[in-house]
Structure formats: C-alpha cells, structure tokens
Image: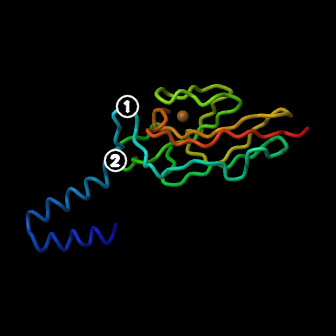
Amino acid sequence: MRTQLLATAIALVAFGTVGASVYDAALAADAAAPATTASGRTASPASAKVYFINLQNGAHVKSPVTVQFGLTGMGVAPFGLVGPGTQNTGHHHLIVDAPTPALDVPIPADMTHVHYGRGQTEATVALTPGQHTLQLVLADAAHIPHDPAVMSDRITITVDP
Ligand SMILES: [Cu+2]
C-alpha cells in the first residue's frame, strides 16, 4: 500500500492535476465508510475468518470456560461505531446452544446470543456440565452479520463436572 501511494505521489508530480485527482481518490478510498452489498448488509472481505483460538470441536473443559475469539482479515470495533475508518470491522457474538442466527437481521440479545459490543476478544462463560454447542458470529455496528457472513464452525464441547 505504501508503495502504491508512493507510486501515485510520483504520478502526481509527473501528471499535475490528473495525478492529483488520482491521489485524492486513493486517499478517499482509504477513509471510506463501510460498503454495503446488494443485500444491504455490510460487506466483508472474502478472506475474513473468525475462529475459536483455544477450543476445538469435541474438547472437554471445566466451567467457567475461557473462550478466545480469533479473527483474521478484519478488525474488532465496538458496536455503534460507524463512518470513515470502520470498514472491515465488527464485534464478536457467541452463540451458545442455539442454531446459527438469521443473517439478515440484528443478532438477538439473550442468554444464548451474547454480544461483545465493547470489542472484547475473549470471554469467560459459566456452563452447566454436559454437552454445549458454541459458534462465533461477527456482526457490524448494528449487530447484523456481514455479507458474506464471517462466522466460525459450530463446535460441540463437553463440560466435565
Ligand atoms: Cu452485537
């Protein structure tokens, strides 16, 4: 990116006003607000991935369970934050013992859909002994999953007594 900007800056010197408009466009794109797709949802890069750092499907754990939220290709931002500089950001949601939520509306907020709206990347949750399913879903400033949705596999863990 730095190289591209440098090349654009050189073009600015070489081509005068034409170069200047290209340079301004490059800066404007960098500071753009999040884009939306045809679905109306906030766009996410195709490479973005969310995953459990410290838990695998089939894991046996003790309660309370520390859950570390992994994210690549995007950044974490508190909920409600919009505008320039917030493109490709979102906040984590932990879905506990519930199916993947609807992707075109805000994720509900209840005991099985926990929002980490302050931008947390880790949580400690109390779970009863037995099997539980966990899934991470990233969502935008308004709690609506991105397009394409950025979410982990739904894993099953066993909490040992
Ligand atoms: Cu949320």
From the top left corner, tell me how far across and down residue 38 is, in percent: 33, 33
Above or below for 86 versus 1: above
* Residue at x-position 66% and y-position 38%: 154
Residue most extreme to the right = 161
Label 1 and label 2: CA atoms lie apart by 21 Å
> Which residue is denoted by mark 2 in the rendering?
84
Say what amino acid the circle numbered 2 marks. Answer: Pro
Above or below for 40 versus 15: above
Residue 70: which disc? none
Label 2 secondary element: loop
Residue 7 picture quarter: bottom left
Q: Earlier in the sequence, mark 1 or mark 2?
A: 1
* Residue at x-position 61% and y-position 51%: 70
Position of residue 111 in the picture relative to residue 140 (left or right): right
> Which residue is denoted by mark 1 in the rendering?
39
Quadrant containing ligand 1: top right
How busy is the neighbourhood of tag 1: few (under 14 within 10 Å), some, or many (20 plus)?
few
From the top left corner, tell me how far across and down residue 41 is, in percent: 40, 34
Say what amino acid the circle numbered 1 marks. Answer: Ser
* Residue at x-position 83% and y-position 45%: 60
Position of residue 107 in the picture relative to residue 37 (left or right): right
Nearer to us of marks 1 and 2 is: 1
How busy is the neighbourhood of tag 2: few (under 14 within 10 Å), some, or many (20 plus)?
few
Which quarter of the rendered picture does the C terminus lie within?
top right
From the top left corner, tell me how far across and down residue 147 is, in percent: 43, 38
Tally the numbered discs: 2
From the top left corner, tell me how far across and down residue 31 is, in percent: 31, 52
Position of residue 149 in the picture relative to residue 158 (left or right): left
